[in-house]
Amino acid sequence: MSERPPGPRVPVAPAGPLRSASAAELAARAASPQALAAALAARGYIVDDALAMTAFLALRMQRPLFLEGAPGVGKTLLASVLSEVFETRLIRLSCYEGLDLAQAAYEWNYPRQLLALQAHPRQPDAAAPGAAPAGDADPELGDLYRDAFLMRRPLLQAIDAAADRAPVLLIDEIDRADEEFESFLLELLGEFQITIPELGTLRARHRPIVVLTSNRTRDVHDALKRRCLYHWIDYPAFATELEIVRRKVPGLADQLRRRVVAFVQRLRREDLSKLPGVAETVDWAEAISHVAGLAAPSTGSAGGALEPATVDATLGLLLKYHDDIERVRGALAAQLLAESA
């Protein structure tokens, strides 16, 4: 069963230029950085000019987009929203230590291969009386490395030649994977193909839109970064984060929304184990809207002031380490609240 069969059994895309999103789609939704930013904003994702330009160039140049930044700033969400913008499938590969080809790209369905081998009757001895001619043998007997037995994982799904349009491939938290795994990605990100020893080289017909993210827990090799367009996503400016909260938590009153965002922006200047990201800001804003609603049940208004006691009681939505919460709660929270007023 370990012998290599004579030649590939699955379709291999012909050589030539790969196709990504259609020209009409690019013209309509990514005709310019401003048009792309507007398409993303229409789906609730606010980008600054620099990120809009980098994402636009990644689409036009058909290059992977490598995003680094602190957790919670929207790296993963960008890939999801891009799949909505281009109305295509999102394929996600979440990286972790020990990730290998079997989980990331493909593996053979060995139980099915064994069953197929056992289910096929043994060929009679050619010298025995009444033996069937050699030409009557099943031409696929022994060929256990074919498409029916191939289990496609996210990376192979992303370059599936049978797909009718380019998907968005998200390789999430690449810094959590081992350095050896990066070496395998070089072929995929450089040529958009995967070589399977038993089958040959499988190449994409439609070049996927690739987004890689990293929280920078370790440095990613330069060879991988060279194949990508790089962008660092920082914490957003006050106006940008205010607009994000307005879209995500529309029930929060304007004045209270400003207090929430201003407090989070001031909190990020403290020396904490983990600074709150945009995701934490949105969660906290939603929580504050519920608390404010309790203060005015008759009107259902989400207005009201942001009180130190409310901040202390809800710090767990912003900070994820006990030491950080204990340090901020009380006098420092009141001080930061006053400074951000």
Image: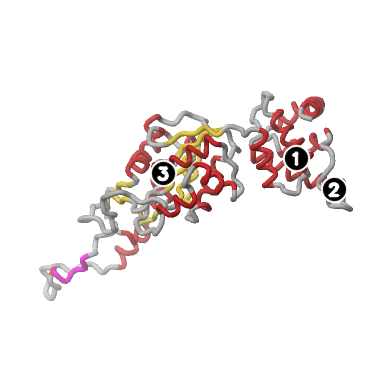
Residue span colored magenta: 135-139
Q: Is residue 106 visible?
A: no
Residue 60 numbered mark, or none: 3
Is label 2 in a helix, a strand or a loop?
Answer: helix
**119 w.r.t. 157: above or below:** below
Q: CA distance from mark 2 to mark 1?
A: 17 Å
Q: Is residue 251 magenta?
A: no
How packed is label 2: few (under 14 Cα within 10 Å), some, or many (20 or more)?
Answer: some
Q: Residue at x 64, y 30 (%)?
A: 274
Relative depth, front residue between 186 and 18? 18
Element class at badge 3: helix
**What element does badge 1 sit on?**
helix
Looking at the rendered structure, the kind of residue marked 2 is Leu
The alpha-carbon separation of the residues under discs 2 and 3 comes to: 49 Å
Q: Toward the viewer: 244 or 10?
A: 244
Image quadrant for the C terminus?
Answer: top right
Q: Amino acid at mark 1?
A: Arg
Of tags 2 and 3, the one toward the viewer is 3
Residue 136 part of the magenta-drawn span: yes
Which residue is nearer to you in this view: 75 or 127? 75
In the image, farthest residue toward the right: 298
To which residue does mark 2 refer?
294
Residue annotated with mark 1:
257
Q: Of the residues shown, which amino acid type is indicated by label 3?
A: Arg
Q: Is residue 234 left or right of residue 271?
A: left
